[in-house]
Image (cartoon, rainbow, N blue to C red):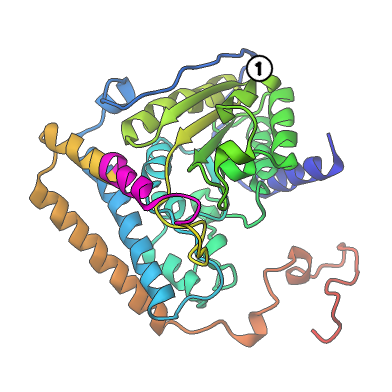
């Protein structure tokens, strides 16, 4: 264990310690199970079969809302010049966030990487506060200071997107440690991309999660290309989740094109975390249609247009789920069109809201950087917070 990894775990633990909810005991039973790939799906598990028609439509609606939000933000970035910096789009991966987060209970928490818009909307954040954050406005969820990569909503147990590759993984372990320490029956969903699985912090986190039997589910959203290098060229061994065996952890590979598959696998892993306090690695096979970020000018040089189009035609998670719901007689084409229109209107309204919102007051630019500087108390050790005295 390194001082760095333990420090990150401790930080997350302290952040969560303010929460007090009903307590429950956890088991420390250890077991390793290598699971086969979960294939294209049906509702064939209890967790999916128990869904009501309206709950199924709501899952579909949330996926569509994420897609329309991302499409509108892309327009704001490329055509209108309203968004600066980076913009990491979630288009093509909607089933992962929506499917897993739909299973959250009162003591479950979420933390993710910089491709965080989908997770934010899935936990219930509004399009307006998210779009305003992209625009750098004071009405944004992080007061316009975080931008695309740093959406936060602690009141929804959403501990944000993180710009450092793999930096959220020890924090996820820390959130899980806090749950176990406080005797709470819950789990932490910690998302990362396939590009983060070779980072040292990730492996340090797995070691602690396994060593201390922490209730964390690491979800690898494997879109196969990291920032622009294929998985075959960048990562030794496959599947990626199999590395869990080195830490005596459970793992599974999931076909993420169908939300039922995601929910089925996550239900097992989350129950394992809550009931037995055991960690899991889920590798969910997915695909992003756009580049690593909107600034990625070479997204069609490291993969072919034909490959992208084939995935869109055959495995698009929204289309796959829509077809399933039509077959189940839960949804009609007219229903789907109406849901799409409502989501597009909501996204346009969020862009108008963001554009009309004020920028943050100059006096607040340096707040929310260090807790100590915002809470000046006698018992806090005095020191130099900022390196530049001109501030």
* Mark 1 crowd level (few <14, some 14–19, many ≥20, 10 Å Cα): some
Where residue 153 appears, as percent x and y from the top left, is 52, 57
| Above/below status of 380 relative to 75 | above
Q: Viewer-proximal residue, 334 or 151?
A: 334
Where residue 132 appears, as percent x and y from the top left, is 45, 73
Where residue 321 appears, as percent x and y from the top left, is 25, 39
Q: Is residue 224 visible?
A: yes
Looking at the rendering, in which quadrant would you find the C terminus?
bottom right
32 sits left or right of 337 in the view: right
Tell me, yes or no, whether the highlighted magenta stretch contains residue 303. Answer: yes
* Residue under numbered circle 1: 28
Q: How many numbered marks, from 0 up?
A: 1
Q: Viewer-proximal residue, 221 or 234?
A: 234
Q: Is residue 108 visible?
A: no
306 sits left or right of 227 in the view: left
* Secondary element type, mark 1: loop
Q: Residue sitting at 74 percent across and 48 percent down?
A: 11
Magenta residues, as a range? Answer: 300-317
Assign the magenta stretch its main secondary structure. Answer: helix
Q: Residue sitting at 18 percent across and 38 percent down?
A: 323
Looking at the rendering, in which quadrant would you find the N terminus?
top right
Asked where in the image residue 368 lies, by quadrant, the reply is bottom right
| Above/below status of 369 relative to 223 | below
Q: Residue sitting at 54 percent across and 26 percent down?
A: 274
Tell me, yes or no, whether the highlighted magenta stretch contains residue 47. Answer: no
| Above/below status of 192 relative to 77 | above
Where residue 255 appears, as percent x and y from the top left, is 39, 31
Q: Residue sitting at 64 percent across and 47 percent down?
A: 168
């Amino acid at each position: 264990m390194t001082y760095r990894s333990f420090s990150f775990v401790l930080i997350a633990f302290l952040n969560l310690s303010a929460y007090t909810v009903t307590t429950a005991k956890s088991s420390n039973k250890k077991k390793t199970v290598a699971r086969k790939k979960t294939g294209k799906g049906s509702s064939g598990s209890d967790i999916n079969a128990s869904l009501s028609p309206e709950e199924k439509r709501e899952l579909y609606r949330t996926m569509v809302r994420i897609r329309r939000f991302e499409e509108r933000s892309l327009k704001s970035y490329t055509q209108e010049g309203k968004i600066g910096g980076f913009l990491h789009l979630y288009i093509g991966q909607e089933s992962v966030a929506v499917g897993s987060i739909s299973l959250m209970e009162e003591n479950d928490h979420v933390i993710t990487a910089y491709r965080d818009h989908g997770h934010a909307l899935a936990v219930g954040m509004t399009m307006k506060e998210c779009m305003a954050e992209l625009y750098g406005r004071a009405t944004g969820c992080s007061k316009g200071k975080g931008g695309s990569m740093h959406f936060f909503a602690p009141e929804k147990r959403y501990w944000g997107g993180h710009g450092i590759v793999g930096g959220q993984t020890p924090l996820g372990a820390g959130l899980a440690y806090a749950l176990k320490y406080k005797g709470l029956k819950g789990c932490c969903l910690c998302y990362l991309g396939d590009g983060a699985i070779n980072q040292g912090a990730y492996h340090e986190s797995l070691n602690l999660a396994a060593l201390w039997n922490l209730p964390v589910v690491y979800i690898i959203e494997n879109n196969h290309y990291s920032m622009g290098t294929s998985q075959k060229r960048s990562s030794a061994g496959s599947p990626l989740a199999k590395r869990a065996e080195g830490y005596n952890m459970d793992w599974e590979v999931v076909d993420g094109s169908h939300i039922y598959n995601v929910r089925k696998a996550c239900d097992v892993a989350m129950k394992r975390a809550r009931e037995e306090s055991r960690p899991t690695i889920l590798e969910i096979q997915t695909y992003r249609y756009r580049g690593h970020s909107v600034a990625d000018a070479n997204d069609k040089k490291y993969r072919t247009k034909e490959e992208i189009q084939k995935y869109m035609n055959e495995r698009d998670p929204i289309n796959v789920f829509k077809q399933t719901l039509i077959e189940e007689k839960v949804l009609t084409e007219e229903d789907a069109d109406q849901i799409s229109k409502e989501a597009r209107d909501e996204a346009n309204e969020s862009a108008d809201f963001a554009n009309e919102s004020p920028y943050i007051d100059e006096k607040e630019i340096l707040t929310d950087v260090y807790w100590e500087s915002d809470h000046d108390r006698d018992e806090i050790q005095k020191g130099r917070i900022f390196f530049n005295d001109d501030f």
